[in-house]
Image (cartoon, rainbow, N blue to C red):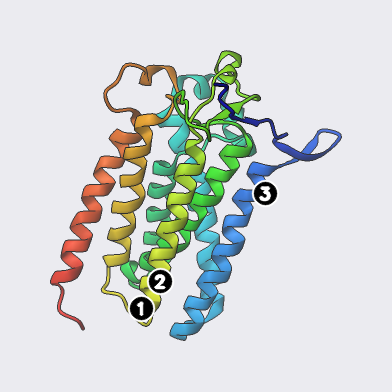
Amino acid sequence: MTLLFISWDPNPEIFRLSSFAVRWYGLLFASSFFFGYLIMQKFFQKEGVPIKLLDELTTYMIIGTIVGARLGHVFFYEPSWYLAHPLKILEVWEGGLASHGAAVGIILALLIFSRVRKKPFLWVIDRIVIVVALSGFFIRMGNLMNSEIYGHQTNLPWGFLFLRSSVPSESLVPRHPTQIYEGLSYLLIFLLLWWYYYKKEGKPAPGFVFGLFLILVFGVRIVIEFIKEPQVGFERGLSLNMGQMLSIPFVLAGILFVYLSQRRTPS
């Protein structure tokens, strides 16, 4: 019996003008901020918070996300290569963003924002993580269009032949489309958190949404990493890869936040 698989061969560039190219990854990354802004706008309107505060928060988020995600990839995964090619650190549109670095960058940016604008940190982050989960969906779809971060070999009928893989030998066998697995998981997490926010009439227990986000997002990451190809050479042969090891503290922190949020007396 002949097995049929999905031949995946999209051009990562939408169009090119001379040396300037618009890539799917960049468009999807930008879309995460666009739709995130619209959703946060609804939250702010519901709670009577001035929209001009959202504009400032968006600036903090963009800087925290991009800087944190890029530096996370540089220092967690390929420090020696990037230190030898420092200008490549600036080429964010080529891919290479670490979700763990983004998480740290976002938390630091929101800590600064909450201190400057005197807004409770947990109030800010409980709402931001809802749209961050949606951003995870867009970013993984960008990885799919780049034919990167895919899974182990599979005989399942939805296995993908990533014909544009950067490793030619890996394009010859069908692989788990882990970008889709992970992206759809993040989309479901977004819908769950969004539903919970409105179920609580925009007043969830402080820290609960943030904690639930950490448990679900990084828990999913730990599970899916078991069928994902190593991103860098040093991960081969490890029982847990870098993504899993970095996810464990976030899951534990999430459990702590959920626990503490249920012990607080409503103010």
- At which x and y percent is residue 228? 42, 30
Inspect this view and state whether residue 165 appears.
yes
Callout 1: few (<14), some (14-19), or many (20+) C-alpha neighbours within 10 Å?
A: few
- At which x and y percent is residue 66? 53, 47
Q: Which mark is residue 199?
A: 1
Q: What is the residue that sits farthest to the bottom in this orientation?
A: 48
Q: Nearer the viewer, residue 85 or 127?
A: 127
Q: Are marks 2 and 1 in contact (CB under 8 Å)?
A: yes
Q: Looking at the rendering, which quadrant does residue 227 occupy?
A: top left
The mark closer to the camera, 3 or 2, is: 2
- At which x and y percent is residue 223? 32, 39
Q: Looking at the rendering, which quadrant does residue 125 occupy?
A: bottom left
Q: Disc 1 marks which amino acid?
A: Lys
Question: Cα distance, mark 3 to mark 2?
Answer: 27 Å
Q: Nearer the viewer, residue 162 or 145?
A: 162
Which residue is located at x 54 percent, y 55 percent?
62
Quarter of the rendering occupied by the C terminus: bottom left
Earlier in the chain: of badge 3 and badge 2, it is 3
Q: Which residue is mark 3?
A: 27
Which residue is located at x 45 percent, y 44 percent?
182
Q: Which residue is mark 2?
A: 195
Picture layout, residue 104 above or below residue 21: below
Which residue is located at x 42 percent, y 72 percent?
117
Quarter of the rendering occupied by the N terminus: top right
Picture layout, residue 50 above or below residue 151: below
Query: How many numbered marks does the figure carry?
Result: 3
Q: Are marks 1 and 3 in contact (CB under 8 Å)?
A: no
Picture layout, residue 65 above or below residue 60: above
Which residue is located at x 47 percent, y 76 percent?
43
Q: Disc 2 marks which amino acid?
A: Trp
Q: Which mark is residue 156?
A: none
